[in-house]
């Protein structure tokens, strides 16, 4: 048999895990859950309200477990071969890179420019790359930082490629006490020292600018456009900072700054609106067939990231298998033992790989490569001819711009060559048209945000957009290179983490209620049933909060009213809930161990996911419901991007006076009060109906809210504010009296 040539070897492979033991355990847990429901139902007439409430909650938990088992059933092991791609061809398609930032305070420019520098330095022909930075804050500091970073890039990018530097975000490369190895050449040591000095100077310039009052800036020259503007009331600002005019492959990519037009009475549609402006502006400037979008804090950790994505796009036998390529979101300098549960390593390891074995991963909003034609609304196997792309249709659908219409037609036409689909003109030649398509009124009367581009109607535009793409029949690809493609920073404080969870829960529930929900996509579109179930598993986070809270209140209710919601210790049926509790937790622990995570990380995640469910997710459903009823509009809350913190207490749970901490505090106080009342009843020798099961449940709730318990006695940001304790105490006291009245 003749050996395979580079042209015949696959550019990627997808293997399925043999997770037979895991499947058996998950099915056994499901069997126990059904057994418990059957027992509840058969004995319902012999018990009171708490039995019915337990049956309802446990039915919900069983439904969620079915969704989880279905999602994790077919876990994949993807592998890409960028070296084979390099051996196969020297002609690569162009890629437009989108970096989004919204607030120079919450998202410091130093973080943004490091992300940009890492992307400018990736291993890919520079004449096939263009980087667009969207600044929704219209910040002169952000623009100034990018201008200064572009000067540094002229030194940094050649340095990285000359010495094949693996880590190309300078703040990570020069972090700590890093220094060249002893066996490094003299030339490298000199260049390294020079780079570090240049980077220090860059940091100082940006830090000085960040602390400078806006009115003290020199608004001459390119900066004049930033004078006398407001963050939410200004014209479109587009600046070409770097331009590869000669089209040199080993030069620097284009770098373009964009701050879209904003007016007070015009809805700007949060991040989705910014992404659509980026799509249109890049469409008239460079029109690459593929687009990468990253958040401002997600730097390129793997310099071959674009090649890994191209392995899927160019190696797929059918383009339907690769509508977009999603890289999982991992984080640098993660807090030890994951106290906030936001590293998401185990979620990616099992749930992420499981979804990828169905119709492909969800679009996660960052670290994702898109086909431009898919974002433009194209469906699989849709053959569009020139006759169908009449000017009237394109202008009605995509907007009144002749150049944009031409670029869209070039993208959508059947048989278009993706290698040649690139506008070789300099971006600066399209500035005037770019201003037009970046204006806030350009979308009026078009399909942007409704049937194409990033979709509007939710703060989780990523999930809704990806869902709509998959509902049209596209599949997506999951790419897991080593080292990870992108690394970002996760919230390192309780309030920031809670805000993020609340935003996710709100947005995901909004998607569920949307006309493009996964249920609609399955019934009337091409979304697979199990993919729909996977979407439901996360989109029901907000609704899950109601059942989580009710179940957390049940043991307290039983001790206060001297009743029980679990079988008594002398009943054989107590074995069922006991086995569920033990096997479920041991199985969860085994997942962490197999993912090389410490046991304490599992404990922390057990706690924080319950805390999120009963606090952040609860506010998520309240936010989504008030919007649905027309009482309020959803606000997009930007999460603070924390830079390195040398505080020895980093990772310790923090609080503020936000009402988001009140429900969890109230649940803890209620259960502690119930335990106290139960102990008093026991000491009095009263006839006790509740048993060991209810006491264990209360102790488990205390374990879950251990950080809150410590917060009662701590001071400063580590303590729960007195106002929150008083509100929670009043709520807990009210519930105690209601339960007593019921008794």
Image (spheres, rainbow, N blue to C red):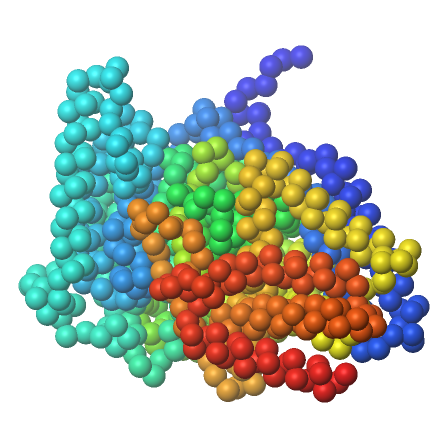
Instruction: Indicate left or right for 196 with 392 as reference.
Output: left
Side of 293 relative to 562 (left or right): left
Q: Quadrant of the C terminus?
A: bottom right
Q: Is residue 403 at all visible to an observer of this figure?
A: no
Q: Which of 591/570 is in front? A: 570
Residue drawn 66% across and 84% down? Answer: 737
Give how far across and how far down residue 700 sits, in percent: 65, 58
In the rendered image, the vertical position of residue 375 relative to residue 599, given as above or below: below
Furthest toward the top, the residue is: 1
User: Residue 109's x, y, as percent?
Assistant: 25, 55
Q: Where is the N terminus found, in terms of image quarters?
A: top right
- The front one of 128 and 103 is 103
Residue 696: quarter of image: bottom right
Percent of width and height locating residue 707: 51, 59
Q: Residue at x 17, y 56 (%)?
A: 144
Q: Nearer the viewer, residue 412 or 138?
A: 138
Which percent across, then down, holds residue 124? 35, 36
At x 25%, y 66%, the residue is 138
């Amino acid at each position: 048999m003749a050996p395979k040539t580079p042209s015949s070897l696959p550019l990627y492979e997808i293997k399925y895990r043999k997770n037979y033991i895991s499947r058996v355990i998950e099915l056994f847990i499901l069997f126990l859950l059904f057994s418990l429901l059957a027992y509840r139902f058969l004995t319902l007439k012999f018990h009171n309200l708490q039995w019915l409430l337990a049956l309802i909650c446990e039915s919900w938990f069983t439904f969620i477990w079915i969704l989880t088992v279905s999602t994790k059933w077919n876990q994949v092991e993807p592998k890409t071969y960028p070296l084979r791609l390099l051996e196969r061809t020297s002609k690569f398609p162009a890629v437009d890179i989108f970096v989004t930032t919204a607030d120079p305070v919450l998202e410091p420019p130093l973080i943004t420019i490091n992300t940009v520098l890492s992307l400018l330095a990736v291993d890919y022909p520079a004449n096939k790359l263009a980087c667009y930075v969207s600044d929704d804050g219209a910040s002169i500091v952000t623009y100034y930082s990018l201008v200064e970073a572009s000067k540094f890039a002229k030194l940094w990018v050649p340095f990285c490629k000359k010495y094949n530097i693996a880590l190309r975000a300078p703040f990570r490369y020069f972090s700590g006490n890093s220094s060249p190895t002893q066996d490094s050449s003299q030339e490298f040591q000199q260049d390294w020292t020079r780079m570090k000095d240049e980077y220090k100077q860059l940091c100082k310039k940006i830090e000085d600018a960040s602390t400078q009052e806006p009115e003290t800036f020199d608004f001459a020259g390119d900066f004049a456009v930033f004078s006398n503007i407001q963050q939410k009331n200004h014209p479109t600002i587009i600046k070409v900072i770097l331009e590869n005019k000669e089209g040199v492959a080993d030069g620097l990519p284009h770098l373009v700054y964009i701050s879209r037009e904003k007016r007070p009475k015009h809805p700007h549609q949060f991040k989705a609106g910014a992404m659509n402006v980026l799509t249109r502006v890049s469409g008239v400037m460079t029109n690459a067939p593929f687009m990468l979008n990253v958040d401002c804090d997600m730097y390129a950790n793997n310099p071959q990231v674009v090649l890994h994505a191209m392995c899927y796009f160019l190696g797929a036998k059918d383009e339907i298998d690769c509508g977009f390529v999603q890289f999982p979101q991992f984080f640098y300098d993660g807090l030890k033992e994951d106290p906030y549960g936001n590293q998401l390593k185990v979620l990616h390891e099992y749930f992420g790989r499981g979804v990828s074995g169905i119709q492909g991963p969800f679009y996660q909003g960052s670290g994702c490569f898109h086909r431009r034609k898919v974002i433009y609304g194209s469906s699989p196997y849709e053959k569009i001819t020139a006759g169908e792309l009449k000017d009237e249709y394109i202008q009605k659908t995509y907007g009144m711009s002749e150049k944009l219409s031409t670029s869209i037609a070039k993208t959508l036409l059947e048989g278009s060559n993706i290698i040649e689909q690139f506008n070789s003109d300099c971006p600066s030649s399209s500035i005037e048209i770019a201003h037009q398509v970046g204006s806030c009124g350009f979308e009026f009367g078009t399909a942007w945000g409704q049937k194409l581009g990033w979709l509007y109607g939710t703060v989780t535009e990523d999930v809704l957009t990806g869902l709509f793409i998959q509902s049209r029949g596209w599949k997506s690809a999951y790419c897991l290179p080593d080292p990870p493609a992108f690394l970002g920073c996760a919230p390192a404080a309780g309030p920031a983490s809670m805000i993020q969870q609340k935003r996710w829960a709100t947005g995901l529930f909004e998607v569920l209620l949307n006309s493009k929900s996964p249920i609609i996509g399955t019934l009337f579109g091409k979304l697979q049933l199990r993919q729909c179930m996977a979407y439901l598993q996360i989109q029901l986070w907000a609704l899950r909060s109601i059942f989580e809270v009710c179940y957390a209140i049940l043991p307290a209710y039983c001790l206060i009213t001297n009743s029980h919601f679990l079988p008594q210790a002398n009943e054989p049926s107590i074995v069922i809930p006991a086995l569920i509790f033990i096997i479920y937790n041991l199985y969860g622990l085994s997942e962490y161990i197999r993912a090389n995570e410490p046991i304490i990380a599992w404990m922390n995640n057990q706690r924080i996911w319950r805390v999120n469910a009963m606090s952040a997710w609860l506010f998520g459903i309240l936010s989504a419901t008030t919007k649905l009823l027309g009482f309020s509009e959803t606000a997009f809350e930007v999460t603070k991007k924390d830079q390195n913190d040398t505080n020895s207490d980093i990772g310790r749970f923090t609080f503020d006076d936000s009402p988001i901490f009140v429900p969890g505090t109230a649940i803890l106080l209620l259960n502690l009060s119930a335990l106290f009342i139960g102990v008093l009843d026991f000491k009095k020798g009263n006839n006790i109906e509740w048993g060991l099961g209810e006491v264990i449940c209360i102790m488990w709730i205390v374990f879950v809210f251990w950080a809150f318990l410590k917060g009662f006695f701590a001071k400063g940001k580590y303590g729960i504010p007195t106002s929150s304790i008083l509100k929670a105490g009043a709520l807990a006291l009210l519930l105690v009296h209601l339960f007593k009245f019921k008794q």
